[in-house]
Amino acid sequence: MRTVSLLALTGAAVAAVLPAHAAEQAVRERASFNADWRFLKGEPAEGAASPSLDDKAWRKLNLPHDFGIEGPFRQEYDGETGKLPWWGVAWYRKHFTSPASDAGKRVYLDIDGAMSHATVWLNGKQVGGWPYGYASFRVDLTPHLKPGAENVVAIRVDNPQESSRWYPGGGVYRNVWLVKTSPLHVAHNGTYVTTPIIKKESATVNVQVTLDNNGGDTAAQVSTAIYALDAAGRQTGPVLAQSEVSPLTKVKAGRQSLLAQSLEVTQPKLWSLRDPQRYVAVTTVTGEGKVVDEVETPFGIRTAVFEAARGFVLNGEHVPIQGVCLHHDLGALGTALNVRALERQFEILRDMGVNAIRTTHNPPAPEMLELADRMGFLIVEEAFDAWRVSKVPKDYGTLYDEWHEKDLRSMVKRDRNHPSVIMWSIGNEIMEQGEPEGWRVAAHLADIVRSEDRTRPTTGGFNHIISGYNGFQTAVDVVGFNYKPLEYAKFHRSSPHIPVYGSETASTVSSRGEYFFPVSDDKKEGAVNFQVSSYDLTAPPWAWSPDVEFRGLDASPYAAGEFVWTGFDYLGEPTPYNSDSTNALNFTDPAARERAAKELAAMKKVQMPSRSSYFGIVDLAGFRKDRFYLYQARWRPELPMAHLLPHWNWPERVGQVTPVHLYTSGDEAELFVNGQSQGRKKRGPNDYRLRWDDVKYQPGTVRAVVYKQGKPWAEDTVQTTGAPARLSLTADRKALAADGKDLSFVTVAVTDRQGRMVPRSSNKVRFSVTGPAELVATDNGDATSHVSFQSLERAVYNGLALAIVRTRPGQGGAITVTATSEGLGSAKVSLSSKP
């Protein structure tokens, strides 16, 4: 039996200013470089990289920025990529004064992500760039920097059309940092922490440090101290371990040197999902007798293994993976990184019972991994959606030959210190799966990963059954199957020594609050008028309902778990209403692929409005669909919960059969309609929902009383509501930081006079904000809406809409959000911000 060990636990290697215990004078600076940029979409008439260019007429903005999300939506744009204008050339310029004290330092620009084909200039001189839009990279400004004078940095991005299968966004959409160091310093992502021996009494912590010397020949020494971090990531308490100072090492000019140290932490607290305890390794570099650099590397101490016989084991405890896949957009905010928006996603997913996330199909923002470390989530980090063979004409296949090794090494080096990261995925549904020599490509990529980090296994998301038997299964350490719930048993019989899991599962499609009749178990049914029924039985031809995936996993106790497609709806890929034929790639059988391609090509003749997916368990606005509660019932069996569907506002269905389904963590329930029992049902071994399929609609109240092991457990009720009468506003958070980044997500509901949300309402609502904040986006979760995300007016969709409010930097005070609708009056919610 193969056992794959993950002994190194980590956190992002973050360069920081010297803490008070080391020195009073900072020897390394890392500052946000996001403020006060000038932006222009398209190519200017004259060279935009020139420092003499007059850019005063360019738009002023702060990064991160996604120009595509600003729209407008256009019907003629491809629905697969969100019907938004994300492609083309754009320029960003920033004027800044470099202090005279920068002379003699190394000055770098760290860009966490620019979409895509980014090129960077300083004072008219090209200093670097990176084509892969999901990669983080560094450029050296030093050779062309003018200390004591004004400087101009310019970034050009060029997003090709037909380069993505989903909405990728456009622009410098992640954070940018200005880093200053001494000539002798720790290299970019140059610390690597592993914990090869972990016992109850102590843990061995090994720290590898790569030094860069951009000055003259010198001699260097390194020492490391370890401290605990609190829940917010702040250093706390005394030093827990201190290394000896390393022997004096000569580092030649223009060269690197690798130094290693070993420390011991006594009575270590292990990083876990319940208690994500972290530590920080503070590494100090001295040269010529003085401190020249210091970096902080957060990490965790934990053991993690994938076992072929029982799945994933964390700190000796079997942990079923309850995961979802996530694309990188943040709904109405687009791809522009916002930590609070990410944190809200994590909070919603945690409430559902999620403990793991697969970053599909690309490296995520560094802040996402920091949140996972801090909040206790497992991460499978994915590198690519394509290798050499493209899925769309200008995707990663055009970059593969020149860039795959650089991109893969960059990803692993950046993120190998995160305790949350448990596997590296080398690719998703790549086209080489069926090629005779395709497994050699997989083996090559896996070897690159192992050369940078041997403490975590490699994996991939394979959608062709043949990938489990044609050599691909030997190229990676853990095999992931996409949409093959019946394949786990066959694979385990053929390769009982290789761990297996569901790398992508379900792909059930639904629209929040939509229900279509008659209800069918045929997964092809349930799509009507560009929406999909929320009975959660509809799926594309290659996919399954959640119930089928659950049965496959329950029959395969050796499978490590699943990553559901997807946690949240995302921009683009509006299956089953795509306007392209790329989804035909999901079929293994060539004849089926050809039929699907013809069907989808014919659909291109229809003007389909859909701009976002239907796959999400949570809709694009962050509102829970019914499916949320089906997964919550499975993943949080200790939580007393019950959720009935559909709603009970069906005046046109009086006397007609209207099936009622119940999602619950209980094992038995009785259903009542207006007090009359519809029968008591007990969950069978392969039942994941309770169903009353013969209920005839009559207005009133539907109530479920749930039992577990014969005792009362939970209840749920749905009622026929009155007509829309008023608005109700609620905010996810009322106390905000006045930093210009913090957000409050404000939900408006249309209710009747008794305060019950009216499920089929579509009233238009107008939002306004007073005080030190601004309204930055609105949404309602409707995949067919082409209303601008920046609009102040939004119709509710099946009773709900969302307003996203952002604080103003440095301006504290009272904030009032108001929603107004004709005939329904207005509602207000009060917030506050503090600098």
Image: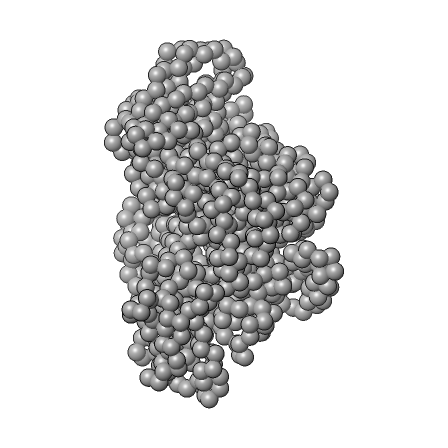
The residue lying toward the viewer, choosing from 246 and 467, is 467
Residue 643 drawn above or below residue 232: below
What is the tally of numbered marks visible in this picture?
0
Residue 66 in sight here? no
Q: Nearer the viewer, residue 269 or 3?
A: 3
562 vs 644, left or right, is right
Specify whether 589 is left or right of 312: right
> Which residue does the image show at 68% across and 55% down from the upper left?
588
Q: Quadrant of the C terminus?
A: top left
Quarter assignment of residue 605? bottom right
Residue 231 located left or right of residue 127 = left
| Whole-percent x, y for residue 761 in the image | 43, 76
**85 vs 177: above or below:** below
Left or right side of 364 for 495: right
The residue most toward the bottom is 655
Q: Tell me the residue at 52%/49% (across/down).
A: 501
Which one is nearer the viewer's eye here, 522 or 312?
312
Is the residue 103 above or below the residue 407 in the image?
A: above
The location of residue 12, given as percent across then percent down, is: 43, 35
Residue furthest left as drawn: 237
The coloring applied to the image is one colour
Q: Residue 194: give x, y in percent of width and height.
A: 43, 29
The residue that appears at 48% across and 65% down in the rendered structure is 686
536, above or below 316, in the image: below
Residue 559 at what x, y percent from top left? 51, 50
